[in-house]
Amino acid sequence: MALIVQKYGGTSMGSVERIEHVANKVASWRARGHQIVVVVSAMSGETDRLLKLAKSIDPRGSEREFDQIAATGEQVTIGLLALALIKAGVPAKSYTGWQVALRTDSAHMKARIASIDSERLLADLAAGIVPVVAGFQGIDETGAVTTLGRGGSDTTGVALAAALKADECQIYTDVDGVYTTDPRVEPKARRLDKITFEEMLEMASLGSKVLQIRSVEFAGKYKVPLRVVSTFVDGPGTLITLEEDSPGGNVEDALISGIAFNRDEAQLTIAGVPDRPGIAAAILGPVGDANIEVDMIVQNVGADGSTDFTFTVHKNDYERASDVVKALAVELGAKGVRTATDIVKVSLVGVGMRSHAGIASKMFKALAVEGINIKMISTSEIKISVVIEDKYLELAVRTLHRAFELDQAKS
Ligand code: ADP
Ligand code: ASP
Ligand code: MG
């Protein structure tokens, strides 16, 4: 008998029929003698609908109220699934985040989990009841409802699994595992049997939305066995593993495990600022003060003693960032400002990169052959990212997938 936390995503909760299908799956796991705690997302599209509604009143409105509104999506699905379970003969009880004392900090719309009271859930399990907990939401110390950021139900699932010392956290979704890249962009993408936490962390942080990045961080930190599986087809899914569990380092001994991409960034350049010590701080200081997170940064030094300074931010922060940059350009005597929202970041990820030279040049060559111009580059030990025009996204992903032979399993 195992204690398993199962998280079901938006598509899996997308209709009454699907919720009844989930209830039957939970019932069959329980019938095999396992203790199950379920975490659910809102019905697909619901969180978008709720946030759009809120922003139609004031796009820059109170984030406390945005959270109050967005959190209602999960309150509906916990009740629906509990009803469906009871109808299927499984004793079940639904809980909102605050009913299980899922405490977070007060960073609305991106709150971090601080603690969870597992007593009530353990008591339910002991009594043979399946608790159904709302994902994505918590409560801060002032009693305000908070949300954990988009995709945050994954993190609720993993945090509950850690708090309950569960044997496994299963993330049920609309794909049957983690693929070499988003199978919606490259149909030849291949499901990975295993991927290391480190690689999954990079994939998630570089835009693969299959798991929220914080859920991977949490699972790595608390050593929660994490598996991505399909709600709709049976199969082993993908296990996220520790590198030391995988002889030979990379679980598949491949140089590259996957390709991630991010369509949510925008690029800003201040052109022709004086090239002097402190200029990067003079630009990024005010950007940081405006609470805008910067991702990639490139500085080109010109021969005439001036420099072009380029960085990327989330598209949600683009308007505010461009206000800050325009004001700075005047202040610093820059030659001008250029901005672009028609960009994507495409990244190659793999722990095997550590020990191999030549990956970057192979990547750049493959893109060049297709006539894809690279606007920015950034690298770390296990990833290479490039910024390109968004119209080339699919071509770039497919080209790199083929160039690095990701459709072929390594033996
Ligand atoms: P859920 O609503 O179940 O949380 P998400 O939409 O958040 O589902 O995540 C699943 C989606 O992630 C898939 O439908 C797929 O399009 C996308 N995705 C992006 N990158 C990958 C990848 N490398 N492997 C699998 N799915 C991916
Ligand atoms: N419903 C939330 C969202 O759409 C949380 C989640 O699905 O994980 O972002
Ligand atoms: Mg998700």
Image (spheres, rainbow, N blue to C red):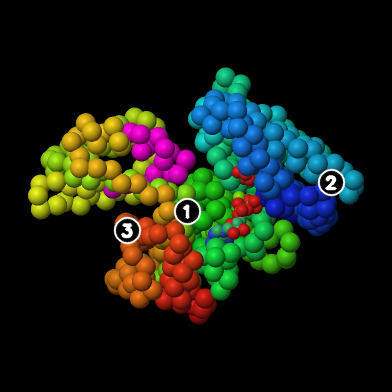
The tag earlier along the polypeptide, 3 or 2, is 2
On residue 263, which mark appears? 1
Q: State left or right for residue 311 relative to residue 92.
A: left
Q: Is residue 316 visible?
A: yes
Mark 1 near ligand 1 (CB under 8 Å)?
no
The tag earlier along the polypeptide, 1 or 2, is 2
On residue 375, which mark appears? 3
Q: Secondary structure at mark 2?
A: helix
On residue 85, which mark appears? 2
Mark 1 vs mark 3, CA separation in Å: 15 Å
What residue range appears in magenta? 310-324
Closer to the eye: label 3 or 2: 3
Count of numbered badges drawn on the protein: 3
Q: State left or right for residue 310 relative to residue 37.
A: left
Please state which of residues 168 and 108 is positioned toward the viewer in this rendering. 108
User: The N terminus is located in which quarter?
Assistant: bottom right
Most extreme residue toward the front is: 336
- Assess disc 1: are there few (<14), some (14-19) or many (≥20) residues with their C-alpha within 10 Å of its C-alpha: some
Mark 1 vs mark 2, CA separation in Å: 38 Å
Task: Indicate the amino acid at tag 1.
Answer: Arg
Q: Residue at x 58, y 46 (%)?
A: 151
Q: Is residue 201 visible?
A: no
Image-quarter location of ligand 1? bottom right
- Assess disc 3: are there few (<14), some (14-19) or many (≥20) residues with their C-alpha within 10 Å of its C-alpha: some
Whole-percent x, y for residue 327 in the image: 28, 32
Vertically, is 146 above or below 215?
Answer: above
Whole-percent x, y for residue 400 in the image: 43, 71
